[in-house]
Amino acid sequence: MKILDRIPLVTLLILTLFLGLAPMTPEPHVLEKLRLLASGALSRPIDIFDLFLHGTPWLLLGAKLVRMAVRANA
């Protein structure tokens, strides 16, 4: 958790906006991969890697925000 605390919130926001949503057209890449996952069609290794690559900034940002909220209420 100390590593997560050291990452600035602005850095995570920028990563989420650029890597987490890229490419934007016709839809954000992470949404396409989540649709493949929901339909059970996420089977190729490149698709799994793409989901991991584009989903990681979202997970880190969520964890950082939850951690900040918990620490603020403690």
Image (spheres, rainbow, N blue to C red):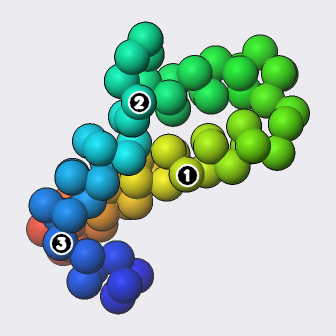
Q: Is residue 68 visible?
A: yes
Position of the N terminus, as image quadrant, is bottom left
Q: Amino acid at mark 1?
A: Leu
Q: Residue furthest top?
A: 26
Residue 42: x and y in percent read 79, 29
| Disc on the earlier residue, 2 or 3 | 3
Residue 72: x and y in percent read 13, 68
Mark 1 to mark 2: distance in Å?
12 Å
| Between 66 and 73, the one nearer to me in the picture | 66
| Disc on the earlier residue, 1 or 2 | 2
Disc nearest the viewer among 1 and 3: 1
Residue 30: x and y in percent read 51, 32
What residue lies at 34% left-to-right and 76% top-to-bottom? 4
Position of the C terminus, as image quadrant, is bottom left
Q: Which residue is mark 3?
A: 8
Disc nearest the viewer among 2 and 3: 2
For residue 57, side relative to residue 47 (left or right): left
Residue 7 vertical position relative to residue 70 in the rendered view, above or below: below
Location of residue 65 by image quarter: bottom left
Q: Secondary structure at mark 2?
A: loop
What residue lies at 85% left-to-right and 36% top-to-bottom? 44
